Image (cartoon, rainbow, N blue to C red):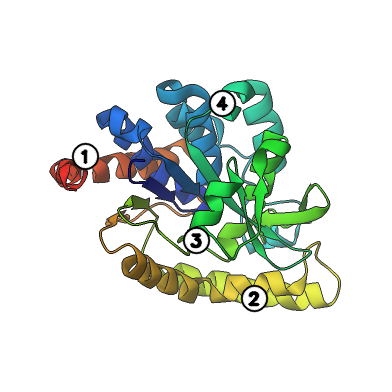
Amino acid sequence: MPSPQLLICGGGGLQGAFITGAMAQLQAMFTDKFDAFTDILATSASMPSVIYYLSFHTNHGGKRIWTDEIPNSHFLAFTSTKSLFSGQPVYDVDHLIDVVFKQRNPLDVERIRATHHHVMFPILNIDTGELEIFSNNPARAQIFFPTTTIRNWLEHDIYTLIRAACAIPLLYDRPVTLGSYRYCDAGISHPFMVPEVLPTGTKCICVIVREKPDWKADLKAMLAGSIWHVRARRGKTALPAWVYTHVMRKPFILKKLVRQLRKRAPGTFLVTAQSPLQSSLQNTPASALHNWQTGEAHITARTEELKTFWTTP
């Protein structure tokens, strides 16, 4: 059996365009190598991008969706901090799923289910408090996550899975039901996932928005998380109070995950944004295109490094 080749993709809200742009460029420049990934582990905003790759391969239309379909007031309704208190989602994930995905860009569900890739998505179970892994091969997923609850995503509607994976607290702030449980975006507790165990010889590429906290943005999110924690304890939110503690801890979790990645997979090829990205609350075609093109440029600039990575045993 050949050694596993693992692609890890993190979350990031609208900054996820950076990750998807990097993925698309990686696929365009190294199509055969990209198709040879045995395992893909995608969190939050990266999850639908991976699903579209599985559905349409090189014709996934990711750039058009990210830069033409998503940047409008139907998806992001944020004018000021008051928008958070409007009672309406700041990120309208329902519009994204029901209109942008289902109506305008429907998936080839049968092709997704028949993929040769083993694909894993973390989603946070808000009824049990556990982060769970949804996999199309639970037995294989157990190799990477031997102590984590594994569920088979082939048993669920693919659009509902995307909705749950993107149901970000604060910005969408409501649960999504899968089977007997309610879920929300795992990116709020884990900006990206690091397997508990990596089989010997695993080659890993990890694409994330950043490897260090952005304290200016993170402090604002931590303040919002603390306010929502209080509101939740007063019964004014659809999610339990403990969910918002993850918002407050997220910068510290990011640092911990990067350390884990370097310890468990020291040869990982890590791709992060080395130049500023547009905010996850800035939703214009220009800002989305900037983030996407930044991801493309980061891969292009490291072409020779990638060639060496893939040719080194």
**Would you name the residue on which mark 1 appears?**
300
Above/below status of 49 relative to 115: below
Horizontal and vertical percent for residue 65?
A: 51, 30
User: Does the residue at mark 1 contact the one at mark 2 (Cβ under 8 Å)?
Assistant: no
Three-letter amino acid code at disc 4? Ala
The local secondary structure at tag 1 comes to helix
Above/below status of 121 relative to 118: below
Marker disc for residue 114: 4
Q: Residue at x 25, y 31 (%)?
A: 29
**How far is the residue under mark 4 from the one under mark 2?**
38 Å
Give the mark nearest the N terminus, 2 or 3. Answer: 3
Horizontal and vertical percent for residue 128?
A: 76, 66
Q: Quadrant of residue 104?
A: top right
**Would you name the residue on which mark 2 appears?**
245
**How far is the residue under mark 3 from the one under mark 1?**
24 Å
Three-letter amino acid code at disc 2? Thr
**How far is the residue under mark 2 from the one under mark 3?**
14 Å
Three-letter amino acid code at disc 3? Pro
For discs 4 and 3, the disc positioned in front in the rendered view: 4
Give the mark nearest the N terminus, 1 or 2. Answer: 2
Residue in front for this viewpoint, 10 or 261:
261
**How far is the residue under mark 4 from the one under mark 1?**
31 Å
